[in-house]
Image: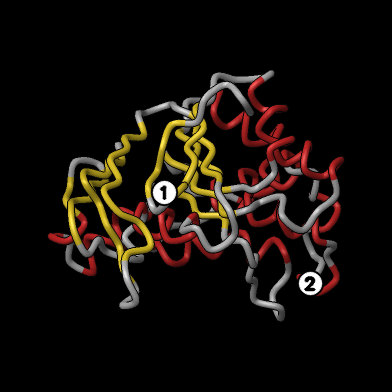
Amino acid sequence: MIAFQNVAHSYGGGDLLTDVSVRLAPGSFHFLTGPSGSGKSTFLKLAYAELYPTAGEVTIFDRDTQTLTRDDVAITRRRIGIVHQDCKFLDHLSLAANMALPFTVAGRECDPQDLDDLLAWVGLKHLANALPPSLSGGERQRAALARAVIVGPEVILADEPTGNVDWEMSLRILTLLVELNRMGKTILVATHDLNLIRQAKSQVATRVLRIAQQKVQLAGADL
């Protein structure tokens, strides 16, 4: 589904990642962990063709990302839901209107009932008409997750989705991610929160990838 083969990436001052070979199989649940600045966000950007490898090959749905045209990238990303760390919204639009934006980008109509059901699933139905600046950190994170899944992607990539919320809200977000995985979605979560990883491992089969010394390694059971 998404595969890295001997991948390296450099921002010009030496490799941030090097010799990375990883495959995210359909329906799998992965965590990506490592110190701040180790390359977690870079790995995710490579996985949805925001960045391209300086060496090696990244394939998404069996396509080499470096052969994709701009239109190809746009079409491919419709199959990938992305939860960014900073949760950006259009502040002048209601939460419901922000949720429907991926349909607008894809040139599709958003079913109002589907939107209503999705907001209820993340516990935000009562805030459908609220403006983003009025939302709490946890509400924004759940809204970001809802927006990422509204068009039915096959893969969810989440960059520190619990980084700015308390433990109770972290568990609520984790529950939503586990539910998505049980529905057959492939999940990759970048996080530094080892307690969150331990909690997930008690609920669903997960693999933990750790970035260390510029490489991505399968972590052992010491988590």
Q: Using residue 1 as the reference point, say whether residue 163 is left or right of it.
A: right
Q: Amino acid at mark 2?
A: Leu
20 is higher (above) or lower (below) than 9: above
Q: Position of residue 138 (x, y in %)?
A: 80, 54
Q: Name the foreground residue: 94 vs 147.
A: 147
Q: Quadrant of the C terminus?
A: top right
21 is higher (above) or lower (below) than 17: above
Q: Residue at x 39, y 53 (%)?
A: 214
Q: Using residue 56 as the reference point, say whether residue 167 is left or right of it.
A: right
Q: Amino acid at mark 1?
A: Ile
Q: Secondary structure at mark 1?
A: strand
Q: Name the foreground residue: 139 vs 101.
A: 139
Mark sitting on residue 131: 2
Asked whether the residues under the numbered discs 1 and 2 touch, taking CB atoms below 8 Å apart as contact, a structural biologist would say: no
Q: Name the foreground residue: 208 vs 70.
A: 208
Q: Position of residue 58 (x, y in %)?
A: 24, 50
Q: Residue at x 84, y 43 (%)?
A: 167
Q: Position of residue 20 (x, y in %)?
A: 30, 46
Q: Secondary structure at mark 2?
A: loop
Residue located beneath label 1 in the image: 80
